[in-house]
Image (cartoon, rainbow, N blue to C red):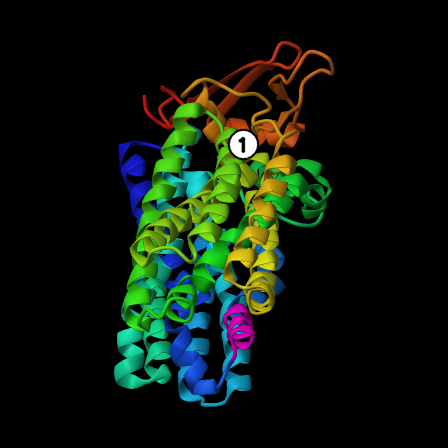
Amino acid sequence: MGKTGVRYRWVVLAAGTAAQASTSAYFQGLAGVGPALRAAHGLSLGGLGLLLACPTVGVLATLLVWGPVVDRYGERPTMAVGLFGAAACLLGAGLVDGLAPRAVLLGLAGAVGASVTTASGRAVLTWFPSDRRGLAMGIRQCAVPLGSGLAAACLPPAAGRFGVHGVFFALAAGCLVAGAAAVALIREPPAQPRAAAGPVSAGATANEAAAARAGSTRDVLRDRRLWRLSLAAGLLIVPQFTMIAFLVEVLHDGRGMSAARAAVVLTVAQAAGAAARILVGVWSDRAGARMRPLRALAVAAAAGMAAVAAAVGAWVPLLVAVLVVVAAVTVCWNGLAFTAAGELAPPGRAATAMSFENSANFGSAVLTPPLVGLLITGVGWSSAFLLVALAPVAAAFLLGPLVEPSGRRPGPRAGSRARGLAAGAGDLSFVAGHPGTGPSFGLRARSRAREAANHETGRACVGDPGHGRFRVRATGGDGGPRDADGAR
């Protein structure tokens, strides 16, 4: 990858971020017009939670399907199908009046829009080296609170002027614009093999043979590390979606603040969360770690929810300040878990692993709004928030035994360019070290077809599995040496 490619990866990141923001606007941003939706359909808090969960139900139903599709066909076609399909569903939701058809169309919008989450994440994983991946994924992940925050700012005025129909028309327009940008700007890195299925034909190229022998979906589902990471992420979703779904309601119904002012608070909280995701990504790059920051954020989320429980009856400005800070803490961790899942993935299955991790997230997101809504109704705001704090505590315990995706904890930037090539292109895989000696950096041997693919794409790797050392060399078309980031 030359200098043009290094610059172009930021274009890919911008397009992926815009795409993720457009889907997050209806995944999470509809909470900003919760009062309007309740009035339009006569919903209770529990009913509102069910309606807000409809896009997430759609995501959960299809996310594991989209992962292998992205690995097989690439990011651009998958994102185009997802964004244009979501726009059509949201347009339909604006044209109907009934609660049931609107809920179904929101579910379908989530089902097709799920492709964007995995495809944009894989684009970051493949275009950026690991010592820049935390920052890049943090920027891409900040699209989630940014998209929902913009929705919280823009949708209430749209609902006030045009009704709930205008809300869905605005969301559809955002998906159309993001889809056009994805088609125009997204492409895969040079010599990036895709996962394939079925036997290898006699006339297959080296890249095709390597792709066919890449890891399988079954390998992803059997990985205990991915299970532990995914379960922990699902638990961390509980405080995150509690804050997203009920921040407006605790200020509006609980403390008498106007719906418009409460929506502004949600917008500020989402903006703070977006900035926090970038800072957390930089932190993980400098620390050379994903798991340690993730564990620290789980503890912080638990403490934050306890603080919200204590502040529910406090002076309103103090409550607002606590809500904004805690909302930022509870939404800033996603990029770390998402990146770690891709780095733990078997060769050629980064999108599948990330969709697996995200499935746990969305499964938890489906259950959290209605269950927490019922919990608030039953025990009150303060007790409900205190009970929610138990989820991140459990997440911290689940994350405890996990080591870093590389199998060790490197120093800042140490060997990260080579690991970035390995994790992004799927040419190398890293395994745990020898029992009793602590984690080491192991290199799993590849088939001759994969070695031929490495030679064809200009990559050569030399390793010593017994001692945990490795080197990666890459050559350009003229035979000149390049590092793992493509720079001479």
From the top left corner, tell me how far across and down residue 409 is, in percent. Answer: 53, 21
Which portion, as a residue range, is magenta? 44-54
Figure quadrant of residue 259: bottom left
Residue 48 among those drawn in magenta: yes
The answer to which image quadrant residue 184 occupies is bottom left
In the image, 386 versus 19, the foreground residue is 386
Quadrant of the snapshot with the C terminus = top left
Residue located farthest toward the bottom when viewing the structure as drawn: 97
Q: Position of residue 390 (x, y in %)?
A: 60, 47
Q: Name the one closer to the observer, 48 or 308.
A: 308
Of 92 and 127, the residue lying toward us? 92
According to the picture, the residue beneath numbered tag 1 turns out to be 291
Give the side of residue 287 with respect to residue 359, left or right: left
- The residue drawn where x is 59% and y is 35% is 344
Residue at point 37% right, 82% down? 164
| Mark 1: amino acid | Met
